[in-house]
Amino acid sequence: NPNGGTYNDTTSNIEINDVKYQKQMTITNPSKSCYTFNNWSVTGAESSINGTTLTMGYENTTLTANYTINTYTITYNANGGSVSKSSDTVNCGTTLTLPTPTREGYTFEGWYDKSTDEPFDFGTPVYEDITLYAQAAQIQTSTVYFDARGYGEDPAPQTVENGSFITEPQAPYYEGAVFSGWYTSADYTEKYDFSSPVYSSFTLYAKYDAVYCTVTFDLGGKADSYNESIAYGQSVLRP
């Protein structure tokens, strides 16, 4: 009984009734995919086997093949990063669940087979030792600077991964003016949209609108009273 294995020839297809007591014969060991042949289990009075030599007893005899499954080592090369384990030992014919490595400033793209330099297919059964190395791409970043136009401290620059977003900083304070937003140029032609993704470095400029105060002139009945709008901090001219 090859027990799931196969023979490379037909020498082991022996009719039991052709074998005499104490007769010796050579048995061909079977092979089985993903397994290594160990030995034969023998049933039959006084029958025995030594290596590949069977000595027949005085009753019908059955040989059953015994195997050990082959195992293989998967070695992980984090390629400059770090990974939770350096290797795995798996049974022949099984598929892998691979760890995810990390590397500061890089995005993991996948595991590659060192022998082929091709991406490793997770669905591929393992039939040999394999070394895998991590493929990673450097993260591209951009920095956005803030110019408060001399009023208070400039907010801290923000460095973000390309394609992500910056956070609108706290509005700077300018006495006598109202902060009206961050603009993409110093001539204030376009207000910046903080919902836009960042793909390059640039500077944003704070814009302020003046505060105007209303001054009423009461001429004591000699003439009609009137109002003037005066910018905050500006002098009022005597009428």
Image: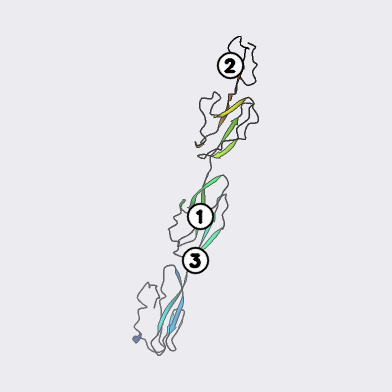
What is the C-alpha distance between the residues marked 1 and 2?
81 Å
> Relative to the observer, which residue lies in front, 155 or 134?
155
- Give the SS element for disc 1: strand
Residue at numbered disc 1: 132
Counting residues from the N terminus, which is met first, the one under dot 2 or under dot 3?
A: 3
Find residue 227 and name its label: 2
- The three-letter code of the residue at mark 3 reads Thr
Q: Residue furthest front?
A: 221
- Give the SS element for disc 2: strand
Counting residues from the N terminus, which is met first, the one under dot 3 or under dot 1?
A: 3
Q: Is residue 20 above or below residue 185?
A: below
Counting residues from the N terminus, which is met first, the one under dot 1 or under dot 2?
A: 1
What is the C-alpha distance between the residues marked 3 and 1?
17 Å
- The three-letter code of the residue at mark 2 reads Asn
Q: Quadrant of the C terminus?
A: top right
Residue at numbered disc 3: 71
Q: Residue visible at 55% across and 39% down?
A: 160
